[in-house]
Amino acid sequence: MHDPDGYFSKRLASTYDDATGDEFDPAVIAATADVLAELAGPGGRALEFAIGTGRVAVPLAERGVTVHGIDMSEAMLSRLRAKNERIAVTRGDFSSVRAGAVDFDLVYLVFNTVMNVTTQDAQVECFRNAAAHLRPGGRFLVEVMMPELRKLPAGQTVVPFTVTPARWGFDSYDVATQAMASNYVTLHEDGRGEFWSVPFRYLWPSEMDLMARIAGLEAEFRWDSWARTPFTSESSKIIATWVKR
């Protein structure tokens, strides 16, 4: 991948906010922003890793939180600026780039984006970078899916998530390395086929807790929705927070 915008090119950015799914439901976005605003505190300061088009940052700013963002995609950041030019942004890799200030009340990373960091070492650095931006007592929040390994029969490495006449989507897993990829096949009306694949590295709640300890953070909340329902062995995702002491 040689595009300086990574996998979030101008083409993808132009339609990103048109996507469907729970994460783009206005009610879910509102609930997300409500929880983040409460965690940041009245008049709080928040830093979003992979801020993108501001899907979450814009409504969070509307709740009185001062929001800064980091993202490597200029195409996505251009969409954000068109919505709210007052949100400060830093372009770069959120696992290493510093936003300048080091006294944020909240650093957050939502919608599985921690998995876009595709090595364990870099994921550890992501936690370290979050901790470096936080004031004492500040929180780091991550929202990420649970890998669907229980859906894999012996010998199978893929789990489909979209099957329509014009579009197929499936996740592929390598359980030895925790590598995975989301793969998409699109059939166009003119008969052309298009394939697109995005690599990830999945990770476990206990693994994230250890990364947090390495970064000097202590485990706090574990939920499986923005309604703050408890995380259990049946949960399909985790929303977790860690505190800087």
Image (cartoon, helix red, strand yellow):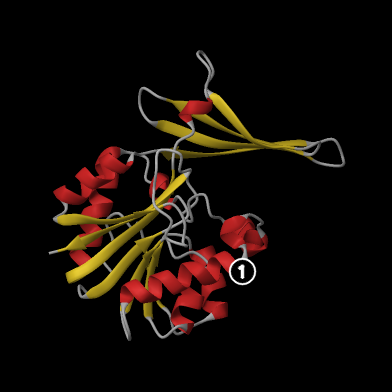
Q: Residue furthest top?
A: 155
- From the viewer's perspective, is residue 29 above or below residue 59? above
Q: Is residue 73 visible?
A: yes
Q: Residue at x 47, y 62 (%)?
A: 227
- The percent coordinates of residue 244 (x first, y second) are 17, 63
Q: Residue furthest right?
A: 190
Q: Is 113 in front, or is 188? A: 113
Q: What is the tally of numbered marks visible in this picture?
A: 1
Q: 203 left or right of 130?
A: right
- The percent coordinates of residue 134 (x first, y second) are 21, 68
In the rendered structure, which amino acid carries the disc numbered 1?
Pro
- From the viewer's perspective, is residue 90 above or below residue 233? below
Q: Considering the numbered disc 1 on the image, is that residue within a helix, a strand or a loop?
A: helix
- From the viewer's perspective, is residue 64 above or below residue 36? below
- Location of residue 94 by image quarter: bottom left
Q: Is 76 in front, or is 155? A: 155
Question: Which image quadrant: the C terminus?
Answer: bottom left
- Location of residue 192 by image quarter: top right
- The percent coordinates of residue 147 (x first, y second) are 45, 36
Q: 232 left or right of 41?
A: right
- The residue carrying mark 1 is 26
Q: Is residue 78 visible?
A: no
Q: Residues within 10 Å of mark 1 (few under 14, many from 20)?
A: few
